[in-house]
Image: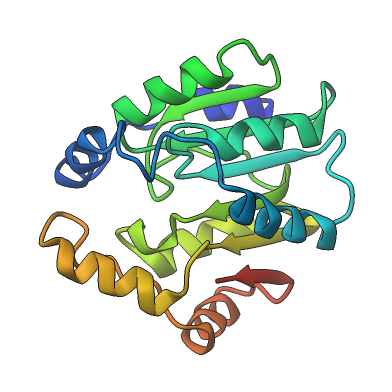
Amino acid sequence: MSYSQQFQNTHQQVNTEKSRFFDAQAQADWAAPDYTPQERAKIAEVFHALPSLVGLTVLEPGCGTGRLTRVLSERVGPRGRVLAMDISPQMVQKAQTKVGGLSNVHLRCASMESCVLPWGEVDLVFCHQVFPHFDHQEYAAKIIPRCLRPGGRLVILHLISSREINDLHRKAGTAVAQDMLPGPEEMRRILDRVGLTDHRTAQ
């Protein structure tokens, strides 16, 4: 079974409360607009540190409205694939509008923890502003090395610091109030425990 067939056989189990929260955020200022010049510069810096993505398969959990998905689609080119997912149907609908005409993008509504993924066929897992929102962070992290080809890579990118992210979530008083981003040392410990030694984190 090919990776695209496996990805299509996605389990639809998601955190309903959190899914509804992000549904309500699909039009929010932080979710929908294009990246600012400063954000684009930070993302470009990450891509500069990576080898060419042309022709590769990229997994993007927590794709939101598809802002980065479109960038990844351009990076991998017509011979590559972007497997993008989000737990929010409204976010996925927004992403579909943004990337629906791109043949190299496969978009699904699913959580990282429950999605059937192509074992050993992904070249890059790009976690962009999603890691705090995994219900089971270490379990989600365990899935990543199984997906990756030998020599595959993981990027964890956040556009503000873990302190700022965690403060925002704590003050939200919503379904994401407990969604904390581990600091750099704890993140390294989590990734080391699941056997991920080749990774880049940007906060």
Q: Which of the 4 quarters of the picture holds residue 84? A: top right
What residue is rendered at 51% in x and 23% in y? 8
Q: Position of residue 70 (x, y in %)?
A: 63, 30
Q: Along the horizontal axis of the image, is 34 left or right of 180?
A: right
Name the quarter where the N terminus is drawn: top right
What residue is rendered at 79% in x and 36% in y? 75
Q: Position of residue 85 (x, y in %)?
A: 47, 35
Rendered position, 66 above or below 181 = above
Q: Along the horizontal axis of the image, is 13 left or right of 76?
A: left
Rendered position, 19 above or below 178 = above
Q: Which of the 4 quarters of the picture holds residue 195? A: bottom right
Q: Nearer the viewer, residue 193 or 17?
A: 17
Residue 16 visible from this viewpoint:
yes
Q: Residue furthest left?
A: 173
Q: Along the horizontal axis of the image, is 138 left or right of 24?
A: right
Name the quarter where the C terminus is drawn: bottom right
Residue 147 visible from this viewpoint:
no
- Coloration mode: rainbow
Q: Nearer the viewer, residue 72 or 136?
A: 72
Q: Nearer the viewer, residue 181 or 193?
A: 181
Q: Which of the 4 quarters of the picture holds residue 53? A: top right
What residue is rendered at 62% in x and 10% in y? 101
